[in-house]
Image: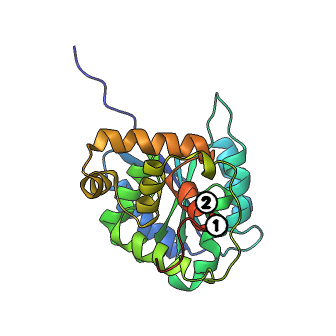
Amino acid sequence: MTEQPLAAIRVALVDDQQLVRAGFRMVIDSQPDLEVVTEAGDGREALHRLAAVRADVVLMDVRMPHLDGLAATEQLTAGGTDARPAPRVIVLTTFDLDEYVLAAIKAGASGFLLKDAPPEEMLAAIRTVHAGDAVIAPSSTRRLLEHLVTALPDDAPATPHPGMDELTDREREVLVLMARGRSNTEIGHDLFVAEATVKTHVGRILAKLGARDRVQAVVAAYESGLVRPGS
């Protein structure tokens, strides 16, 4: 019996620069497991197109006319149903747009990616997000996260998080390492435990914090004061 090929991951491109979209499309469509299903030049057009065309992952620019990427991300991620889950959103950013990244994560984005990231990193990010993980481990994203949190002043008041007190000491250790951009494998090495044990801890952390993914958990760690910029 012949095995049926797996369905390709359906990708939507949202950017007001047509040349950027064309470059991304060329790279994505070159992969047998990925397929660009629609494009849009602004957030409003993206919402219209994605109401008619199902996408698994959306690459979303921030600064666009009519409706920016933050508002579009919030509406997209809030509009999912059991029958039709919301697409996962990767926010495209540059260093001078760092102030938007935290807001994008809060709006429901599953991660962020530098616009000038190497093609293989963009492809890996799409696959990672589609698999249910957040884009936080690649080296450039780590640097971006570190750069982002320096925007939080050292003396900024901590915002209490209702689930933070429920974490065990070991779960707090794991969350701190997550906030430093460590992967499950690296956390396992750091704490001398199996990767499967780390995955269990991460799952419990997400459940206790009510976080959708690792990125939201990391944001909670910074905002609650568990991790401070530069620590």
Name the residue at the front extreme.
169
**Looking at the image, is 45 positioned above or below residue 35?**
below
Specify the amino acid type for callout 1: Glu
**On screen, residue 35 above or below 94:** above
Give the residue type that dot 2 points to: Ala
Q: Is residue 185 left or right of residue 128?
A: left
Q: Give the image quarter of residue 201.
A: top left
Q: Quadrant of the N terminus?
A: top left
Secondary element type, mark 1: helix
Q: Which residue is mark 2?
A: 220
Which residue is tagged 1? 223
Is any part of residue 40 visible from this angle?
no
Per the model, the C-alpha gap separating discs 2 and 1 is 5 Å
| Residue 5 falls left or right of residue 110 | left
Residue name at image x 47 percent, y 40 percent = 203
Q: With respect to residue 205, does 112 lie above or below?
A: below
